[in-house]
Amino acid sequence: MLKVAVPNKGTLSEPAAEMLREAGYRQRHESRDLTVLDLATMRETPISDERSVDDQVEWLDDAHVLYGIDGAVWKANADGTGEPQRYIGRADSPAAVRWSAPPRAQT
């Protein structure tokens, strides 16, 4: 299953918008709600945060997304369950660090 977090701020680049249209996705224009799109089923799942998410969204892992609101980064379940949790205070935008291999121990 491939999951895509579609931004709700500004507009998608034309190549990205075309790719989503070809996959059968109908873009939302009336809502600023953050949703996760399952490309296998074309089902949108709203994130449980009722605030307007007006920032970039970053995948933390297969089950969680990060986004910035009110000077903090929040973590929410990608399946729409549960309440969002404050992940990092005094921050504006998420940036998840991923390792291709575990870091080596310092000697």
Image: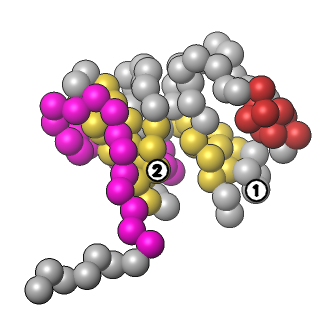
- Residue plotted at (36% across, 45% down): 95
Q: Quadrant of the N terminus?
A: bottom right
Q: Quadrant of the C terminus?
A: bottom left
**Residue located beneath label 1 in the image:** 40
* Few, some or many residues within 10 Å of mark 1 (<14, 14–19, 20+): few
Q: Nearer the viewer, residue 28 or 105?
A: 105
- Label 2 residue SS: strand
14 left or right, relative to 93: right
Q: In the rendered structure, which amino acid carries the disc numbered 2?
A: Trp
65 left or right, relative to 5: left
Instruction: Check if residue 80 falls in the magenta segment.
Output: yes
45 left or right, relative to 78: right
Q: Indicate which disc residue 4 carries.
A: none
Kindly indicate the quadrant of the structure image that contains residue 2: bottom right
Q: Earlier in the sequence, mark 2 or mark 1?
A: 1
Q: Nearer the viewer, residue 92 or 84?
A: 92
- Label 1 residue SS: loop
In the image, which residues are magenta? Answer: 77-100
Q: Position of residue 33 (x, y in %)?
A: 52, 25
**Residue located beneath label 2 in the image:** 59
Q: Position of residue 21 (x, y in %)?
A: 84, 34
* Few, some or many residues within 10 Å of mark 2 (<14, 14–19, 20+): some
Can residue 83 be spotted in the picture?
Answer: no
Kindly indicate the quadrant of the structure image that contains residue 90: top left
